[in-house]
Amino acid sequence: MTLDIQQVLISDPVDPVCSQILQNHGISVTYARQWTKERLLQEIQNYEVLIVRSETKVTDEVLAAATKLRLVGRAGTGLDNVDISAATRRGVLVMNTPGGNTMSAAEHTCAMIAALSRHIPQACAALKNGVWDRKTYMGNELHGKTLAILGLGRIGREVAIRMQAFGMKTIGYDPVISKESAAEFKVDKMELEEIWPLADYISVHTPYMPQTHHLINAEALKRCKSTVRIINIARGGIVDEAALLDALISDRCKGAALDVFVQEPPKEGTTTWQLIQHPRVVCTPHLGASTVEAQERVAREIAEQLIDLAEGRQAVGI
Ligand code: NAD
Ligand code: MLT
């Protein structure tokens, strides 16, 4: 398959290396800086390719207006901001860069687990406010604790390998990874029912889809230790935010580390907002892939994959 590409629209902040590569191949690139949805709907008809991160919502409405569009390129992993069935119906290819930010997301998860255990953000904020408090921020060792990883794909297994270096026992669940292949990276694969009562920390690393919506819910939290800590660097909605907030308030959950939310950015008065304000929640604004290395890598990969398609070579990430 060969794609005739003249005009590419980049509608989210993507590293400039992407446009450099495309322009070096004679492709014209437009950056849609802070375009309103109306402007995007008006102008999208001029482009064969749309490149996004996670901010632009590539809905059926956008795709319907994009009469020349042949491909949506996602500089990153998650494709939940792209209506894939509408794109397929309209004959638009969707391509991502599956491994480009794996290391950054895995490292961020490990940093969040450590920060959560030792209350680093809260203690730092207190100290900056002039409060020298060594009692409130008593932490827990990771050594000897059990980390459950739900989703043993690219990121999940890198998290397992790194947290084993802290002396954590790693268990996990994934419907498509066999017990034998999980054992290769020292994760004891179990059923979810077995995992809940054993886990000290549960970190989710699945895509967000109907099967993983509220994978961690009120029922699951009731079966967990009251000292369990929940980590979500994957996608908002995999953890039921209302159930997590309830468990934190009623002391049936010791803490949570969250990088992703049902609503991004969150609005005041919502459950997401309340969760973020909870003193035992450590949080970041969707920074899992926000490293210089990962952003340069995904930008380069999406551009090179696009050029491969344009020049009739085998494409990946479709
Ligand atoms: P991946 O496809 O390599 O792995 C996902 C794994 O989840 C697969 O092995 C799959 O079999 C498993 N899975 C599917 N349904 C499941 C279920 N019901 N229960 C348990 N496991 C299930 O994906 P990845 O690259 O490791 O990414 C994982 C998640 O992290 C995605 O949601 C992605 O969007 C997100 N992500 C977030 C950031 C960030 O900035 N916070 C960065 C990169 C990726
Ligand atoms: C992803 O799925 O790749 C992440 O959410 C990172 C991002 O692009 O912001």
Image: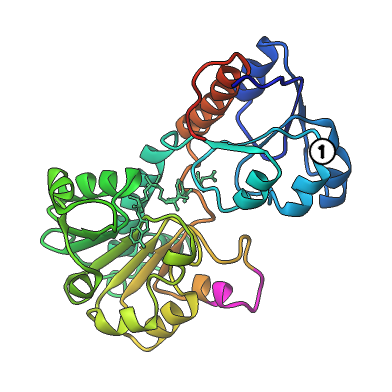
Q: Is residue 137 above or below residue 46?
A: below
Residue 126 shows up from this direction: no
Q: Quadrant of residue 98?
A: top left
Amino acid type at mark 1: Thr
**In the image: residue 44, left or right of residue 217:** right
Residue depicted at 27% across the width and 43% down the height:
158
Q: Which residue range is magenta in the image? A: 267-274
Residue depicted at 60% across the width and 49% down the height:
84
Percent position (x, y) of residue 271? 56, 78
- Name the outermost residue toward the bottom: 250
Say if the magenta span includes residue 6.
Answer: no
Instruction: Choose between 107 and 89: the one closer to the eye.
Output: 89
Residue depicted at 13% across the width and 43% down the height:
184
Say if the magenta span includes residue 271.
Answer: yes
Percent position (x, y) of residue 246? 43, 85
Assess disc 1: are there few (<14), some (14-19) or many (≥20) residues with their C-alpha within 10 Å of its C-alpha: some
Instruction: Choose between 214 and 198: the one closer to the eye.
Output: 214
Colour scheme of the rendered structure: rainbow
Q: Which residue is mark 1?
A: 67
**In the image: residue 235, left or right of residue 65:** left
Residue depicted at 39% across the width and 77% down the height:
217
Instruction: Choose between 270 and 240: the one closer to the eye.
Output: 240
Percent position (x, y) of residue 60? 73, 53
Total residue callouts: 1
Q: Is residue 65 above or below residue 220?
A: above
